[in-house]
Amino acid sequence: MRLRLTALFLTLLISTAHAAPAPQPVDIPLASGVLHAQLYKPEGAGPFPTVIALHGCGGLGGHSDPVLPRYRDWAERLLKAGNAVLLPDSYGSRELGPQCRVREMHVKARRERVADIAASRAWLMKQAWVAHDRVSLIGWANGASALLWAVRPQSAARDLSPDFRAAIAFYPECRISAGLGWSTRVPTLVLIGADDDVSPPPACRQMVDGARGRSALARIVVYPGADHDFDRANMPLHAAAGSRDAAAPERGHFGMDAEARAESQKDVARWLAR
């Protein structure tokens, strides 16, 4: 009897642990068309601090899941901290699949995705449950590159609504921004791995260093030994069977990525709480 009760308790515990809030689909007007998005919102009337979360070149969702685990993990973490999270689907809204290796980008970070950010912000400003002075941005890779364009002084909204409170860019492509003399009008944090071979860390450091003295607060954190995409969801501190580094989970990029992911969670929380 005791074993049966223990088994039942463990089953309930596991099912509760895996239970996650389902996002709510929303449609946001664009100048031409509609921007589909997924919304995670705390219970109650608010107003809630809100984060616009921008997916990378792989897109927001998969065949059976509107939000990939990596973004769902972050959304749930931000939700538990009391934030609403809006995830615009820049590719799916335009009937496009992943754009990581396409020769010609039909949705550009500096153009269409910046427009998506502006439309998302305008939509949020009309919602009574949003704390209008506490809307922030977070982006990954291509989404982070779009974020860098969106926070430049030249991209400021022309209305009288409060500006973004903060911005956090995970491993953006910084080379173009560094060459153009990037600066930001809102506090911006860049998070990148020292061993990132996709988005060169030196370019991001040059971009941030170059903005000092003529910009809002800009900071960069370079995580030692971490690779590109170090914060992806479901990467445990211990290597699972069949993983890329199962024989030595605490050595090489596997262990360093896990450490960087844990540190980045703290850095994100601190930056949003400013």
Image (tube, rainbow, N blue to C red):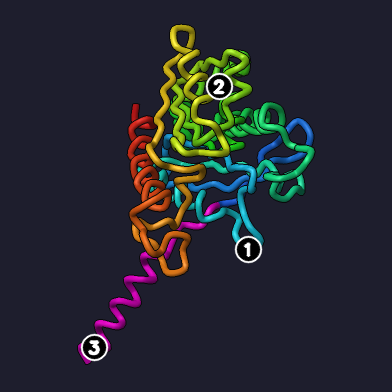
Evaluate whether residue 146 shows in this view.
yes
Please provide percent x and percent y for residue 139.
53, 36
Kindly identify which residue carries mark 2: 151
Looking at the picture, which amino acid does disc 2 mark? Val
Q: How far separated are the C-alphas under marks 1 and 2?
A: 33 Å
Q: Is the residue 244 above or below the residue 241 in the image?
A: above
Kindly identify which residue carries mark 3: 3
Q: Residue at x 45, y 14 (%)?
A: 216
Quick check: is 258 in the magenta stretch?
no
* CB-based contact (under 8 Å), mark 3 and mark 2: no
Q: Earlier in the sequence, mark 3 or mark 2?
A: 3
Evaluate whether residue 43 shows in this view.
no
Q: Quadrant of the N terminus?
A: bottom left
Looking at the picture, which amino acid does disc 3 mark? Leu
Quick check: is 15 in the magenta stretch?
yes
Q: Is the residue 209 above or below the residue 221 in the image?
A: above
Q: Which residues are magenta?
A: 1-23
**Which of 36 and 252 lies nearest the eye of the viewer?**
252
